[in-house]
């Protein structure tokens, strides 16, 4: 704490916001391979169950708990026209706000943000996915990378949201 | 067939029409869209059959409770302070409000927020504020929460019936008991537990479509090709067996009383106890050890029966236990003809180590659930079917004749086991029709 901060190591909220907005843009435009390039080689992605938002995926049944292997497979699936739940791909629009750096742990920057995702499909009303993100962003020579991404929904149950077939 | 239809679009007024001579089996699509049919189903099926409430493991300690909806009624599933499991109707005897609002917890009592009536965890009345104002003869002691008319369990699975005269659960379950036994036998102590974390989601489709879908192996190759790709990419052999649509030759079985199951030689791995490459090399020795315990306890033949077959079991009318790449307990309730609420849990042996439990949960999410690689596509298929039913007047019949007339045992990719459900459904609905006609 008493040591002077290395200026190169400071990550600003603005840089984090820029990163999250770029990520949202890639996801909303289904540029999924470009999105994968934002991840570290051991990244993980979690959607906890609605009734246990703070739980650990090793002991609790999640909605999504992907390691990088399954995450890559998920992208293969999402790009396949036989991914029926997402063909044609949903139109999604992500609003990201209340971005905060909540801590720094070595080269990991902990970030929280709020999200509201509107999802539209033909013949359906809008479905709204609202909640908070918890990120572990890793500082690398190539810039920030996502080491862990957790999308925690506010709703008490998925209910009318139905399935979580796209990336939250 | 069509020339025998009456003006309402169903053959002599029957919704399920089986012709054993011409080998046709048709279901009228009105059963998926009609409010009258749903109302009849509520009264003749959900009010009469045994409906799944919950699992004993969800109520570990005295005072533990879970609030549920069972056959449309709000119910408190709880273990009273003396340790007895109960299912109490969650409605104040005074003026009706729910007396327990939380999803789950531990209670000393249930208190209505409206006028403050309190109830013990066994349902008995505990206190009525200002009870001296009630007239002489007011039966305070008789004002406890109303229990569901019948509550019985089989191997920790609790079911309720709202029909006092229902046959006992043991008899009702018939051949389904053997398949529950195969699930429970995975635990060295015979104790399975519901794992924390519930999946609750809606499907905009008729509830009966999920019965069909849960046991229908005909759809695997088309609906779930992306999951098959994932398995293939992970080194699992999913090449169809010679002359079959699936990697192995599996069967569809009639278990009596409308219960049915698939029974397939496993190809997709099982936490208990069949290793596949998706689990990783490091899991091999552990799964071998689970297998050894199973063989030592059950013998070679029974162990193979437990560990080398996958079974999707449907207990009439609305409980599905899928025992395969993990164990799923899935319950679904109609809300409208074109809408159901689905609740799904993972089940595992209480003895599992942390690593084994993590492997089970990982395997669950590979296929199942609203974020899995397969369930979202099932939901899509059912919702598309429901949308197609809007034209039920022009296209009145769904065809379920696959496998009819075969001299062999019905395959899981046939529809013989789906017909088991529909025959039972039809039998109960026709009984109601006849009794309505008599009165």
Image (tube, coloured by chain):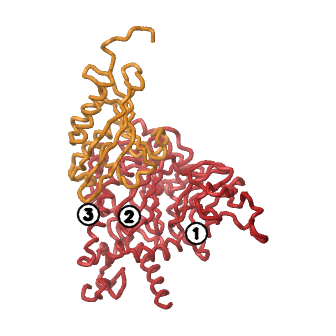
- Mark 2 surroundings within 10 Å by alpha-carbon count, few (fewer than 14), some (14 through 19), many (20 or more): some
- Name the residue carrying label 1: B169
Q: Nearer the viewer, mark 1 or mark 2?
A: 2
Camera sees residue B126? no
Residue for point 71% across, 61% down = B124
Task: Give the drawing colour for chain A.
Answer: orange
| Percent coordinates x, y for residue B397 in the rendering | 28, 77
- Which secondary structure lies at badge 3? loop
In the image: residue B430, left or right of residue B399 = right
Q: Do the residues marked 1 and 2 share a common chain? A: yes
Residue to which mark 3 is pinned: B243
Query: Mark 3 or mark 2: which is in front?
Result: 2
Give the mark toward the camera: 1 or 3: 1
Residue sitting at 30 percent across and 27 percent down?
A145
In the image, residue B276 lies at what x, y percent?
37, 45
Identify the colour of chain B in the image: red
Outermost residue, front side: B133
Q: Residue at x 38, y 55 (%)?
A: A160
Q: Quick one: label 3 or label 2, which is nearer the N terminus?
A: 3
The alpha-carbon separation of the residues under discs 3 and 2 comes to: 37 Å
Residue B388's place in the image compared with B363, above or below, is below
Residue B189 or B341: which is nearer the viewer? B341
Who comes first in sequence, dot 1 or dot 2?
1
Q: With B359 as the anchor, is B122 left or right in this view? A: right
Pointer 3 local density, CA inside 10 Å: few below 14, some 14–19, many at least 20: few
> Marks 1 and 2, how far apart in space?
28 Å
Q: Earlier in the sequence, mark 1 or mark 3?
A: 1
Q: Is residue B245 left or right of residue A151?
A: left
Q: Is residue B247 among what the camera can see?
A: yes
């Amino acid at each position: 704490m008493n040591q002077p901060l290395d200026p190169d190591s400071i990550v600003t909220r603005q840089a984090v916001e820029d990163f999250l907005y770029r990520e949202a843009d890639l996801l909303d435009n289904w540029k999924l391979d470009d999105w994968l390039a934002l991840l570290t080689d051991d990244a993980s992605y979690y959607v906890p169950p609605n009734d246990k938002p703070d739980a650990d995926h090793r002991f609790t049944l999640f909605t999504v708990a992907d390691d990088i292997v399954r995450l890559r497979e998920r992208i293969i699936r999402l790009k396949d026209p036989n991914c029926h739940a997402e063909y044609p791909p949903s139109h999604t629009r992500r609003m990201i706000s209340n971005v905060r750096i909540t801590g720094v742990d070595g080269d990991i920057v902990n970030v929280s943000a709020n999200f509201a995702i509107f999802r539209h499909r033909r013949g359906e009303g809008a479905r709204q996915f609202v909640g908070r993100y918890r990120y572990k962003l890793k500082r690398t020579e190539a810039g920030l990378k996502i080491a862990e991404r957790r999308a925690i929904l506010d709703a008490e149950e998925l209910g009318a949201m139905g399935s979580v077939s796209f990336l939250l | 067939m069509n020339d025998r239809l009456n003006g309402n679009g169903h053959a002599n007024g029957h919704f399920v029409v089986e012709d054993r001579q011409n080998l046709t089996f048709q279901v009228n699509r009105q059963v998926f869209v009609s409010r009258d049919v749903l109302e009849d189903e509520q009264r003749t099926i959900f009010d009469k059959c045994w409906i799944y409430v919950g699992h004993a493991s969800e109520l570990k300690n005295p005072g533990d409770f879970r609030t549920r909806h069972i056959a449309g009624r709000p119910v408190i599933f709880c273990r009273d302070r003396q340790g007895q499991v109960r299912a109490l109707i969650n409605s104040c005897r005074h003026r009706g409000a729910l007396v327990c609002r939380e999803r789950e917890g531990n209670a000393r009592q249930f208190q209505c927020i409206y006028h403050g009536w309190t109830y013990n965890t066994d349902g008995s009345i505990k206190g009525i504020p200002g009870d001296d104002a009630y007239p002489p003869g007011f039966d305070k002691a008789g004002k406890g929460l109303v229990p569901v008319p019948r509550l019985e369990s089989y191997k920790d699975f609790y079911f309720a019936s709202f029909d006092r005269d229902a046959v006992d659960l043991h008899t009702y379950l018939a051949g389904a008991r053997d398949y529950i036994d195969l699930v429970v036998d995975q635990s060295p102590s015979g104790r399975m537990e519901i794992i924390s974390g519930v999946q609750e989601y809606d499907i905009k489709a008729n509830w009966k479509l999920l019965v069909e879908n849960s046991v229908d192996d005909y759809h695997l190759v088309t609906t779930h090709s992306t999951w098959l790709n994932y398995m293939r990419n992970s080194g699992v052999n999913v090449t169809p067996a010679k002359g079959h649509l699936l990697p192995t030759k599996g069967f569809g079985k009639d278990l009596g009383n409308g219960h049915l199951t698939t029974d397939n030689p496993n190809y997709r791995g099982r936490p208990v106890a069949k290793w596949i490459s998706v689990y990783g090399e490091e899991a091999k020795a552990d799964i071998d050890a689970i297998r050894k315990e199973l063989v030592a306890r059950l013998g070679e033949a029974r162990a193979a029966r437990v560990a080398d077959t996958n079974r999707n079991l449907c207990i009439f009318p609305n409980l599905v236990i899928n025992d395969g790449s993990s164990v799923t307990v899935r319950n679904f309730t109609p809300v409208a003809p074109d809408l159901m609420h689905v609740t799904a849990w993972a089940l595992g042996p209480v003895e599992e180590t942390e690593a084994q439990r993590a492997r089970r949960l990982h395997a669950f999410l590979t296929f199942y659930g609203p974020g899995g690689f397969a369930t979202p596509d099932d939901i899509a298929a059912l919702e598309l079917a429901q949308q197609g039913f809007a034209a039920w007047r022009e296209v009145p019949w769904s065809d379920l004749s696959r496998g009819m007339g075969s001299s062999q045992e019905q395959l899981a990719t046939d529809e013989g086991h789906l017909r088991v459900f529909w025959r039972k459904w039809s039998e109960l609905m026709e009984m109601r029709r006849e009794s309505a006609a008599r009165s």
